[in-house]
Amino acid sequence: MARISAETRARNENAIRAVMDRLLKGDLPPGGGCDLKTLAAEAGVTRTAFYPKKNRDGTTRPGPYQHLAEEFERRLRALQEGGQVVDPRTAQIERLKNQVAELKERLAKRDATVAELTAFKNLALSRLAAQHDEIQRLREQAAAIGNVRRLPASWAGEAPYGSCS
């Protein structure tokens, strides 16, 4: 790989710093984020220039613009710790994560309520069935004895004697 001249390197560093300032102010390109990939693409340098390199003997050396990547990440972290949201996609992701957590909680509560109401319905139905069976048994018992007399029906529109109405 060919070495770049000092003039080209200085020009690239200036371009990277300009893009870095723009990204950290929140001026993000469409489809881009506040990250090294976007920084490299917007500055016109390869992303690998931000990472350490290996020499032939296996030792590592810093990438040509690694110091700028570290500065970018440091400034980004400082902004985030200060509560400033640089990348609106990150804020949207966090908002959606919170919304999903809230919806899961609401769904769990709703499932618990449905289970509780289903149990109540089953209990009520079993009690109604038991009461119905008891009423049928008492009617059959009363019909078998034969000593039960019907009370006279009240006149239409009049309440029976002793009624509260």
Image: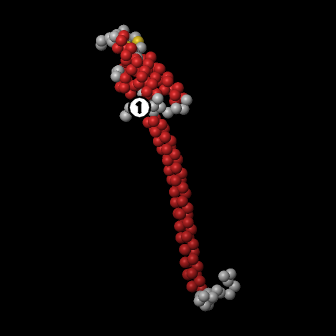
Q: In which quarter of the image is the C terminus?
A: bottom right
Q: Where is residue 11 in the image (x, y as percent from the top left)?
A: 37, 16
Residue at image x 35%, y 25%? 41
Q: Please, which residue is most extreme toward the top here?
A: 57
Check disc 1 and report its element: helix, strand or loop. loop
Depth order, front residue of 96/14: 14
Q: Mark 1 points at which residue?
A: 28
Is residue 164 shown to the viewer in this render?
yes
Which quadrant would the N terminus be assigned to in this image?
A: top left
Which image quadrant for residue 15?
A: top left
The residue that appears at 55% across and 74% down in the rendered structure is 132
Q: Residue 77: give x, y in percent of width and height.
A: 50, 26
Label 1: few (<14), some (14–19) or many (≥20) C-alpha neighbours in 10 Å: many
* Looking at the image, residue 151 lies above or below residue 81: below
Q: Kindly tell me whether residue 51 is visible in this rendering.
A: no
**Vertical comparison of 67 with 104: above or below:** above
The residue that appears at 35% across and 21% down in the rendered structure is 45
Which kind of residue does numbered mark 1 sit on? Leu
